[in-house]
Image (spheres, rainbow, N blue to C red):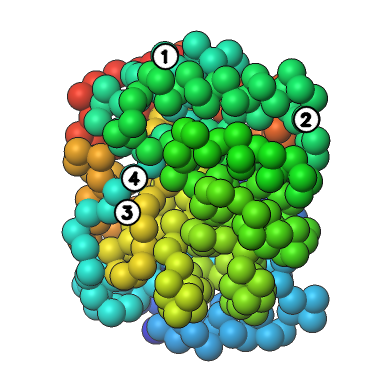
Amino acid sequence: MKILEVKKFTVFAYRTNYVFVKIFTDSGITGIGEGTLEYKENALLGALEDAIHVIIGQNPMEIERIVNDLYRESYWRTGPVLMSAISAIEMALWDIKGKFYKASIYDLIGGKVRSTIRMYANGWFSGAKEPEQFATAAKKAVSLGISALKWDPFGSAYMSMTRKEFFHAIAIVEAVRAAVGNDVDLLIEGHGRFNVSTSCRIANALKPFDPFFFEEPTPPDSLDAIAEVRSKSPIPIAAGERIYGIHQFQEFLDKGCADYVQPDVSHCGGIMAIKKMAAMAETHYISVAPHNPSGPVANAATLQLAGNISNFCILEIMLTDVTWRKELTTEKVVFDNGDIVIPDKPGLGLDLDEIACSSHPFQPIDLRHYKGTLTNIRPSGSTSFYFDGLPVQGKEIDTL
C-alpha cells in the first residue's frame, strides 16, 4: 500500500479553525487526522505541506518509521507547528491501519481496558461574566447529568491580579460550588497566565472549594515555575497541554510539574506519543487527563486512547459547539450518565465530509484571554449539543 495524496481542510468553528488532513492510498482506504492549532493555522498548513511531499509514496502502515523520519529530518525539531503537523498525519495513518485490519485503534495498541470514560464538561459557561451567571449555567449543565465542570474564572488577568479581580474570580468559584453542591467536581483553568506568587495565592484560595485540579497556573515557558507552584500548592495541579514531545515530557515529569498530565493528541506527536507519555507517567503514579477542546477527529483519537490507557483518568469534552460541527464528519459521541462511551468502529470510527468542510472556510481569530471576551466561545443562536444521550438532544441553544 502507498500514499497517493494528502488533502488539507481548514474549517471555521467560531472559537477556532479546525485543521484536518485526509490521506488517500492506492488501496482505496483513506484516513483522517486533526492538528488544529489555534491562531497559527497558516503556519500549520505550511508545515503540513512540507511533510506531505515526504510521505507521498510511503507505506502508510509503517507509522513509527514515518513519524520518526518526519521528526528526525526537521532540523529545528519540536515546537507546536511541527508537532501538530506530525500529529495530524500520524492520526490519519492509524485511521488507515485500523480500517485495513477492521479494528479499533485501541485494539491495535494493546486492547480495551474500559468501555466508558468519565468526562468533564468545558464550554458550558458561554457568555457568563458574573458569579450568578456562572452559577445558573452550572446548574443547567449538572441537570443534564454532568458530574464535573471546568472553566476559567479569571477574566482578562495576566501575571498578577488586583484585589478586585482576585476576589471576583474566587466569588465565581464559590457561586458555582454553592449552585452544584459537593457531589460535582470543579476543575479550575488558569490558561498558563500567572506568576508563581499569584498562582500560589489562587491555589490557597481555591482549597476550601475542593477542586479536582488547578490547571496550568503558570506560563509554559518555565517548567521550574510550575514545579515550584506544585510544590507549594495545597490542591492538585494539572498541566502539559503545551508539551510537544516525549523528551520535553520526560523533563516535565522529572521536575515534578503536575499531579495530572494533559498532553494533546493534536500537538504532541499523535496517538503513540500519548501512549508513550502515559507509560512514562505511570512509572510516577501520575494520571493522564488529555487536553481535548478541539474538533471531532481529535476527539475520536482521544477516545481511542481513553479506551486503552490504564492510567487515563478523565476526558475533557466541549459540552456545546457550533451547529455545523455535526455536518463535518460522521462523529457519533454517546453520553451515558456522566461518561462517554468508547466507540468500537474500525480506525477512528468517523469519516470527513469534504463538501461540508469547504462550506465553512477559514476566518482569522484572535486570542480572547486578555480582551475581556474569554467566555464568548460560541456564536449567539448557533450553538448546539453534538452528542447523543443528553436529555435535550438536538435542541439549539444560545447558552446553557
Position of 154 compared to 398: left or right?
right
Would you say the residues marked 4 and 3 are in contact, meaning their CB atoms lie under 8 Å apart? no
Which one is earlier in the sequence, the residue at label 2 or at label 1?
1
Q: Which mark is residue 119?
A: 4
Amino acid found under the numbered disc labelled 4: Met
Numbered circle sitting on residue 161? 2
User: Rounded to the nearest whole Å, what is the CA distance between mark 4 and mark 1?
Assistant: 20 Å
Please identify the quadrant where the N terminus is shown: bottom left
Q: Is residue 12 visible?
A: no
Foreground tag (2 vs 1): 2
Residue on which the image places disc 1: 136
> Where does residue 379 sit, x and y in percent of width and height?
54, 20
**At x 58% / y 66%, what residue is drawn?**
268
Residue plotted at (51% across, 60% down): 259
Dividing the picture into quarters, in which one does residue 48 lie? Answer: bottom right
Separation (CA) of disc 3 from disc 2: 44 Å
Q: Residues within 10 Å of mark 4 (few under 14, many from 20)?
A: many
Instruction: Name the residue tied to disc 3.
Output: 350
Q: Is residue 129 visible?
A: yes
**SS of the residue at dot 3?**
loop
Of pointers 4 and 2, the one earlier in the residue sequence: 4
151 or 178, which is in the foreground? 178
Q: Residue at x 80, y 40 (%)?
A: 159
Mark 3 neighbour class, 10 Å CA radius: few under 14, some 14 to 19, many 20 or more:
some
Q: What residue appears at the point 24 percent right and 75 percent down from the top-left corner? A: 111
Q: Nearer the viewer, residue 134 or 224?
A: 224
The 10 Å Cα crowd at callout 1, few under 14, some 14 to 19, many 20 or more, is some
Q: Are marks 4 and 1 in contact (CB under 8 Å)?
A: no
Helix, strand or loop status at disc 1: helix
Viewport quadrant of the C terminus:
top left
